[in-house]
Image (spheres, rainbow, N blue to C red):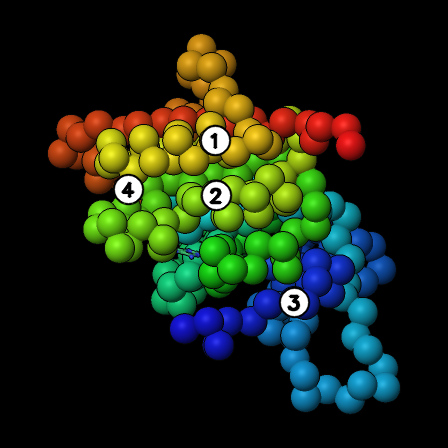
Amino acid sequence: SDHRLIYPSRPEDMDWSSLFPGFVADGQPDHEGAEAHDEASRSDEPETEPRRPRRLTKEVEVADIGCGFGGLLVALAPVMPDTLILGLEIRVQVTQFVQDKIRALRSQSRDDGARAYQNIACLRANAMKFLPNFFRKAQLAKMFICFPDPHFKTRKHKQRIVSATLNSEYAYVLRPGGVVYTITDVLDLHEWIVQHFEAHPSFARVPEPEQEADPCVALMRTETEEGKKVERVKGDKYVALFRRLEDPPW
Ligand code: SAM
């Protein structure tokens, strides 16, 4: 539950170096394997010398909300090799699985004399609660919400990952021109998603021709674990993309 989730009190306090050791700025130690986000909010350290988070050469610009087993992260890594992509996942063991998978892919790539998969990482977090703790305003260029839990019953709708309140948080962390990518096999949820984003003043739906021309859309359909499951049963997949609009002048 949330009381065991660890998160920085503000984005500047987040130490990303253990998640993206290949992007630690020169001259700073590289601590692969250490749980930086653990350290970032540890309160039992002496107050006298506040720790300064190690800096990266880049910021995270793409987030996969509820990344599950990380199929999309792995597929996106070579498509955007210079972009840092973060999966957020609430389940401990699933997060661990994805972290182990990324470590293995990096090590395999190193054995091959390359440096692939340094740009993806997975963090345990409740994306419904702490996004602005991790990302500053307008930091993200893309957010993926792939096959979110449907929470079918009306009394459970408040647990859906798309809502008026959460969309305002997504608008806050996304830069103008940035895109939220959504896909689901549940028509009712797709309609809910479209209705909530279209009702939000910061978002406009991306027209279908543009949607279909976006290479990320194909990956979302075929590379997510849920997308593969739906494929096996020949189910429908409903896609909708929403662009973050410029804020109106005051
Ligand atoms: N996106 C993946 C895919 O398409 O294969 C996984 C989809 S799975 C149905 C939904 C995932 O969202 C689960 O792994 C679940 O643990 C995660 N999740 C649910 N609520 C979450 C939250 N508040 N924050 C982060 N992850 C969450």
- Contact between marks 1 and 2 (CB within 8 A): the answer is yes
Q: How crowded is the residue under tag 3: few (<14 C-alpha within 10 Å), some, or many (20+)?
A: some
- Under circle 1, the secondary element is loop
- Contact between marks 4 and 3 (CB within 8 A): the answer is no
Name the N-terminal-most of marks 4 and 1: 1
Q: Residue furthest front?
A: 250
**Comparing marks 3 and 1, which lies closer to the viewer?**
1
Q: Amino acid at mark 1?
A: Ala
Residue for badge 4 = 226
**Disc on res. 199:** 1
User: Could you say where residue 242 lies in the image, as x and y percent from the top left?
Assistant: 50, 28
- Under circle 4, the secondary element is helix
- Under circle 2, the secondary element is helix
Q: Residue at x 54, y 53 (%)?
A: 121
Q: Amino acid at mark 2?
A: Ala
**Comparing marks 4 and 1, which lies closer to the viewer?**
1
**Disc on res. 8:** 3
